[in-house]
Image: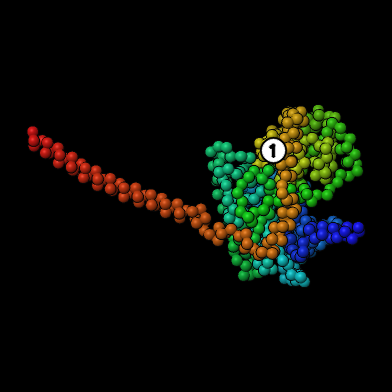
Amino acid sequence: MKYFQYLFSSLLLLTVLPIQGYRILCVFPYNGKSHFQVTEALCKALAEHGHQIDMISHFPSKNRIANYTDIVNLLGTRRAVTNNISLNEARQINTAVTFYIATVFGGDLCSLMGNAKMQRFIKNPPNDPPYDLVITEYFGSSCYFGFGRLLNIPIIGIVASLEYAFMNEVMGNPTSSSFFPGILVEFAGLPNFWQRLVNTLENLIQPRIFNYYSSSQTDDMRKYLRQDMPDVREIEKDIALLFVNSHYSFHGTRPVIPSFVEIGGLHIEMDKSQLTPELQEWVDNADDGVVYFTLGSLVNIETMPNSSLLGLYESFRKIAPIKVLMKIANKDLLPPGLPSNVVTLPWIPQMAVLRHHNTRVFISHGGLMGSLEAFYHGVPVIGIPLFADQYRNINVFIHKGMGVKLRYEDLSEKTMDAALNTVLNNPNYMEVAKREALHFKDRPMTAREVANFWTEYVIRNGPNMLRSPTMDMPWWQTNLIDVYGFIMACIVIIIYFLTIVVKFAMSILLKDINIWKTRKLKEY
């Protein structure tokens, strides 16, 4: 009997673990914690699948993980952004999102390649065994795609959000401007002409802005990696596959090329966080429910004006005995008068709170990580969007009937009262949220299985197997400008000759008519 148990266990392990473990380099120069949630989840999933992962990031692992090694620690090399951005800074970013992505969150990060620890790695990379693949974040710093050329191996990109228009252009992925809202437009759908116009202009202009402000990254690659590096626009085309942190049940359906792979929900599947014993007891005893309020890992609630905070105090006081849990990095900055039903903490295991059965409402800025987590766990949302894709994300909740939106400019006791009353007292919001959660989870493979399969696929089959032909075509061929131009020219030529023929026929006809009239006059 034990023999068959061992045999069954061995067969089960063979179905879970890959036949061959690969060595993979993960390079993540951006120090945004929410982005790293997704990128780290991907690399940890690969490590647990049996691959050897070497990590370069600002977030070294606190616990030892099998097959996972932090080889370059970038912590402290950049100004911290976690819990370090005011509301005014966030709104400033929103005035020129693509510019900030290409510069502050993009080109500025290329200089990290000149860091002494990075240079030691670049000049003497491990080769026993050599790397099989590079994975790096596709955000603003395209210069890191040069690691693929440096090590002569395929490269996979991962974007921690919905893809940007400039990524579609590079990869040859259709933008679907007529029906699929881009990441930086606030619409959840495109039902009218003006929305389609705005979406089309965004998809056309955004890549031009990004390419202009990121063009200097070519010089960075040649300075820090290798002098013969090609232009950064050419390097971007080395991407063999792009993992996108999206899912059609949330973002909507759209056509994508095979090298665009959705892994929305991966960081949720990999989450193992637990509530602290004190917080567990507090939430368990919230018989009337919990409202969870955070503005994410970047922006601090306590940087709101005191007038807005005092208005929120009064609104939260009115819903007692419902409890309110707020993420506050620095409690000393809050005005006095916090209601007794409100608890603040500098750090909260967000997914553990959202999956608790007593959590009734999530008040959020609409960042994608938190939005997907609320969607996955079926929690209605009150959104206060501040910048970038947050407007689109919150409008998705509204469109589906599981959320409401508050404008930051209108945030007050009165508006929060109305929002809480709507979501807490209308059971439809919770019913829709639970139904949408089922839609999100209903898929043939988990996000983790998808990520493992396609990563190994690229290593097995090489970087060009999924490559779109449009990556090697000029824009006017991709968009059939030459074909449409030829058709239009043919139509114009045909119309021109038809006009000549008609004029010639009319002249003959008029001539015959005149001859006939002349004969008739002579007869009289």
- Above or below, comparing residue 99 to residue 91 in the picture: below
The answer to whether 286 appears left or right of 432 in the picture is right
Residue 399 occupies which quadrant of the picture? top right
User: Image check: 189 left or right of 509?
Assistant: right
Tell me if 239 is positioned left or right of 515 in this view.
right
Foreground pick, 304 / 38: 38
472 lies above or below 189? below
Between 421 and 47, which is closer to the camera in this rendering? Answer: 47
Is residue 228 at least partly visible in the picture?
yes
Disc 1 residue type (three-letter): Phe
Residue farthest along the front direction in this orientation: 1
Left or right? Give the position of 140 relative to 441: left
Across and down, in percent, residue 466 comes to: 62, 59
Please identify the quarter of the rendering in which residue 410 is found: top right
Disc 1 residue crowd, few under 14, some 14–19, many 20+, Cα 10 Å = many
- Viewer-proximal residue, 18 or 406? 18
| Count of marks, rendered view | 1
Name the element at disc 1: helix
Q: Which residue is mark 1?
A: 397
The reply to whether residue 363 is visible in this rendering is no
Q: Quadrant of residue 510?
A: top left
Q: Which residue sits at x=12%, y=39%?
A: 518
> Where does residue 79 sit, x and y in percent of width and height?
75, 54
Q: Where is residue 295? Give x, y as percent.
A: 75, 42
Please give the name of the residue rendered at 12% of the width and 36% of the height, measured from the top-left corner: 520
